[in-house]
Image: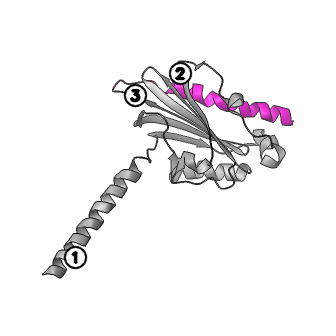
Amino acid sequence: MPGRVVIALVVAGVAVLGAGAWLWLGRDAPRPAAFHGTPTSAMYAPVDSRADDAAPLTTGELFRAGALGELARGEVEELADCDDALWGAAAPGCTQALRATYTGGAVAGQFVIFNLPDGRAADALVTALRRDGFVRQAVPFDPARSRAEVRALGHYVTVSWVGARGTADADLVPPLIALDSLGQAIQSRVLAAT
C-alpha cells in the first residue's frame, strides 16, 4: 500500500509541476494575431554587414521624444542581452536590442530593433519569429487582438507590434504604421554608407 501512495503522490506532483510550468512559461509567450515578416532586400546592401556599419545604434537615433501620431512614448531601454527581448527564438551574434513602448487611447504597442551580424542572420531571426517564438511583450495589450510587422533591414531586424487595450475595438493599422516608421532610422544609415 505505501508504494502505491508514493507513486500516486509522485504522479500528482509531476502533474502539478507541469501545469505550473505551463502557466508560468505561457505568460511570457504571447504571439500576435496577425504577423507579416519581410526579409532584407538589395536596398539595404550598404548595411548588410555590421562590419560595414559598425557604429552602435542609440536610443536617441531611433526614438524621437514626444508622441508618434496618437501614441505617447513610454519606456525606452537598451537591453543588456538580446535574448532578454525574445522567447522561443534566439538571435545569435546580436549585440544590441533597443525597445520602446507606446500607448494611446485604446491601443498600445512596442518597437524593438536587433543589431545582428549580417543580413543572413537578420533573415533567420525573421523566420524564427514567424514560427518559433516572438518578442516578449513589454506593455499590456490583448495579443489576440494585435498585429505585428517584422522586417529585416540589412543586418537589423525591426519588430513593430500593436494591440487593443480594454474591450473597445481599435483600428490597429494607423498605430502599426506609426511604429513601423521608426525603422526609417536605418534608411539614414543606408544613405550615409552610399
| Label whose residue precedes the other's in the sequence (2 or 1) | 1
Left or right: where 35 falls relative to 123: left
Residue to which mark 2 is pinned? 71
Q: Does the magenta stretch include residue 171?
A: yes
Instruction: Tell which residue pokes out farthest to the front in this image.
Output: 2
Quadrant that contains the N terminus: bottom left
State the residue at coordinates (78%, 47%): 50
State the residue at coordinates (38%, 51%): 24
Tell me how far mark 3 sits from mark 2, CA to CA.
13 Å
| Label whose residue precedes the other's in the sequence (3 or 1) | 1
Image coords of residue 182 (percent x, y):
65, 29
Q: Where is residue 106, by image quadrant?
A: top left
Image coords of residue 66 (percent x, y):
60, 18
- Disc 3 crowd, CA 10 A, few/some/many (<14, 14-19, 20+): many
Dot 1: what SS?
A: helix
Tell me how far mark 3 sits from mark 1, CA to CA.
46 Å
Quadrant that contains the C terminus: top right
Dot 3: what SS?
A: loop
State the residue at coordinates (25%, 71%): 10
Q: In the image, what residue type sits under mark 1?
A: Ile
Q: In the image, what residue type sits under mark 3?
A: Arg
Residue to which mark 1 is pinned? 7
Residue to which mark 3 is pinned? 165
Where are the magenta residues, as a range? 167-194
Badge 3 vs badge 2, beta-carbon distance below 8 Å: no
Dot 2: what SS?
A: strand
Q: Is the magenta stretch mostly helix, strand or loop?
A: helix
